[in-house]
Image (cartoon, grey):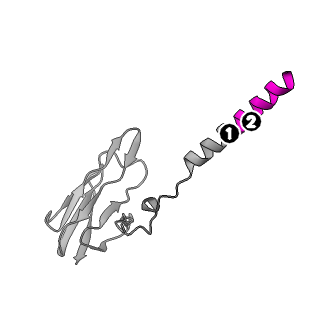
């Protein structure tokens, strides 16, 4: 009787394991990257601390690197928000995000980065189609 219960328990555990594994696998091709839905997020254009110019394509996102310890109080401004729209640095959910932006239309704009000490640097942006 005890052997039968042990065998039944082992069999039940094995069946549950198979069920869990089957639930984790997917044969549905709609989850695949090859399913025809090619919308992908491209990485942002990184603008390093010493960069004075950069280029991007319409729709690209920007990540403006700021020296460590100087993120709080750093601001960014665009000479033409229709060409390059900027976003300020922020803290959200315990994470810190650099200032950045998005390339909105073809043309030229200047991003001015103002550091907490009042010093500035300009980044000449060229946006292509």
* Mark 2 → mark 1, Cα distance in angstroms: 6 Å
Identify the element where label 1 is drawn: helix
Q: Residues within 10 Å of mark 1 (few under 14, many from 20)?
A: few
**Is-magenta flag for residue 7?**
yes
**50 or 60: which is nearer to us?**
60
Identify the element where label 2 is drawn: helix
Q: Quadrant of residue 59?
A: bottom left
Q: Position of residue 34 (x, y in %)?
A: 44, 69
Residue pushed farthest bottom?
Answer: 128
Q: In the image, is residue 93 above or below residue 79?
A: above
Q: Position of residue 38 (x, y in %)?
A: 36, 69
Q: Position of residue 35 (x, y in %)?
A: 41, 67
**107 or 119: which is nearer to us?**
107
**Quadrant location, the C terminus:** bottom left
Name the dominant secondary structure of the magenta segment. Answer: helix
Q: Quadrant of residue 95?
A: top left
**Disc assigned to residue 67:** none
The residue at which mark 1 appears reads as 15
Q: Position of residue 43 (x, y in %)?
A: 39, 65
Residue extent of the magenta highlight: 1-15
**Is-magenta flag for residue 91?**
no
The residue at which mark 2 appears reads as 11
Pointers 2 and 1 in contact (C-beta within 8 Å): yes
Q: Quadrant of residue 54?
A: bottom left
């Amino acid at each position: 009787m005890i052997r039968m219960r042990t065998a039944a328990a082992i069999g039940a555990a094995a069946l549950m394991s198979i069920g869990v594994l089957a639930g984790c696998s997917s044969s549905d091709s709609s989850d695949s990257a090859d399913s025809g839905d090619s919308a992908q997020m491209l990485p942002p254009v990184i603008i390093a601390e010493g960069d004075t110019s950069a280029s991007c394509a319409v729709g690209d996102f920007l990540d403006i690197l700021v020296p460590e310890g100087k993120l709080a109080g750093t601001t960014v401004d665009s000479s033409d928000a229709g060409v390059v729209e900027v976003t300020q640095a922020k803290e959200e959910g315990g994470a810190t995000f650099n200032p950045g932006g998005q390339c909105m239309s073809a043309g030229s704009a200047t991003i001015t980065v103002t550091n907490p000490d009042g010093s500035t640097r300009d980044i000449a942006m060229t946006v292509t189609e």
